[in-house]
Image (cartoon, rainbow, N blue to C red):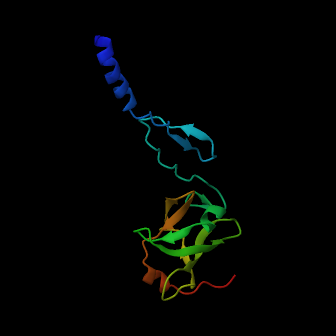
Amino acid sequence: MRTLILLPLLTLAACGSDPAPAPAVNLADNGTPVAATPDATPSPRPSPSATGPGTALGLTYLELEDADLVDASGRELAEVERIDADAAGTIGGLVVELKGPPLDGKMVRIPIDGLSIVPDGDGYDLRTAQTGDQLAALPAAPPR
């Protein structure tokens, strides 16, 4: 008799439970699925480490040419258009195209010194301490 009374209660309790959530799956940089562990925290992106001719700030030519120039708050000020390097491949500066009024499209040369790298998606941006007005006040970069 007790079993008959408890059976409907057990059945109701089993019906009310939510199914277990599917295990979390992350994708590695190469697209391979990687199962996440419950206590894992994402590791910070490693600092770039390119060295030698054709590199600056740990970035290669291609990474530098793909970068945007941002201010301290992360607002885009300019886009890197070309690399200024000597015959040995030593990068001394960047030619950037300013974004936003009043000088949208003006090309200026900025030195590589004083820039820092900021991870952005699958690439990097370059942070400057200069303001948009300070960049706009620079002389126009000479044509190639």
Q: Quadrant of the N terminus?
A: top left
105, 40: nearer the viewer: 40
Q: Position of residue 14 (x, y in %)?
A: 38, 27
* 74 shown above or below 45: below
**The one of 104 and 84 positioned closer to us in this rendering:** 104
Instruction: Where is residue 48? Give x, y as percent.
Output: 56, 53
Residue nearest the observer in this picture, 77 or 13: 13
Identify the residue at image location x=54%, y=69%: 68
Please state if 53 lies on the left or on the right of 67 as rendered: right
Q: Nearer the viewer, residue 42 or 50?
A: 42
Residue 2 falls in which quadrant of the image? top left
Q: Which image quarter holds the C terminus?
A: bottom right
Does residue 15 appear to the left or right of 57 in the view shown? left
Above or below, 74 against 133 in this view is: above
Q: What residue do we see at 53% from left, 76% from top?
A: 78
Image side of residue 89 versus residue 107, left or right = right
Look at the picture and state if 62 lies above or below 29.
Answer: below
Residue at the spot 32% in from the left edge and 15% down from the top edge: 4
Image quadrant in which you'd find residue 85: bottom right
Q: Which residue shows up at 57% across the image and 67% down it?
A: 67
